[in-house]
Image (cartoon, helix red, strand yellow):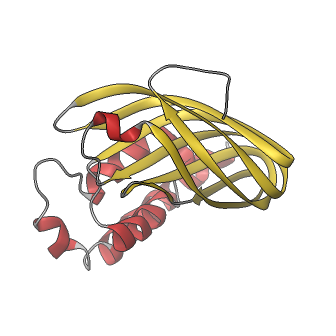
Amino acid sequence: MIASCFRPILSLIVTLCLALGLTSGALAQSAANSSQYTSQEIVDAGHGFFGATSGGLAKVVEKAFTSYGLPNGYILGQEASGAFIGGLTFGEGQLFTKNAGQHEVFWQGPSLGWDYGGSGNRTMMLVYNLPSIEGVYGRFGGVSGSAYAIAGLGMTVLQRNGVLVVPIRTGVGARLGLNVGYLKMTASPTWNPF
């Protein structure tokens, strides 16, 4: 009931963010080649995937586009994670590319730091500088932080051999912390996070 009352307001905010924020990136996007995604394509995919919880999605996507440019792939999936000093994350989804189609991808990984809680997330990962589908498989390291109770939206950056993966997560649960870790991307599921 409450969420349906805020839907028109969230739509207006997203539209204003897109109108104001994406003007600066218009020149960069006009130079996009056929293998890259524009911010509008990513926002549209995210709205369809995240649904009503995507009010802040346009701002997060704009931040990623301003910092890293146009991605040549993205992943939509789900993940579960939990931590008490050390943590584990497991997820699965679909990698979308314009030139090589869709591919199933799984990820898992450990983390270590000041981190407590658990969450279930719907995750969109923007993928930059992907030379081939095989380039997404391997360990991507980075620093992550989170602070939310019940729900939240956040972005982190992971890197491996020049390929960047930028997970944008909307989660349900309670999580507080800062950690260092990696995500291991694989073509098939595994329970081994290392």
Q: Nearer the viewer, residue 31 or 2?
A: 31
Q: Nearer the viewer, residue 27 or 7?
A: 27
* Drawn side of residue 32 relative to residue 107, left or right: left
Question: Where's residue 42, x and y in %?
Answer: 33, 50
* Drawn side of residue 177 relative to residue 189, left or right: right
Question: Where's residue 182, x and y in %?
Answer: 61, 48
* Drawn side of residue 170 relative to residue 38, left or right: right
Does residue 16 appear anywhere in the picture? no
Question: Where's residue 175, x and y in %?
Answer: 80, 52
> Which residue sits at x=49%, y=19%?
188
Identify the image quadrant of residue 33.
Answer: bottom left
> Which residue sits at x=30%, y=45%?
73
Q: Which of 140 and 66 is in front in this view?
A: 140
Question: Where's residue 57, x and y in %?
Answer: 48, 57
> Which residue sits at x=29%, y=59%?
39
Does residue 99 appear anywhere in the picture? yes
Identify the image quadrant of residue 88.
Answer: top right
**Looking at the image, is 77 positioned above or below residue 24?**
above
Q: In which quarter of the image is the N terminus?
A: top right
Q: Which of 127 and 112 is in front in this view?
A: 112
**Looking at the image, is 78 positioned above or below residue 13?**
above
Identify the image quadrant of residue 110.
Answer: top right
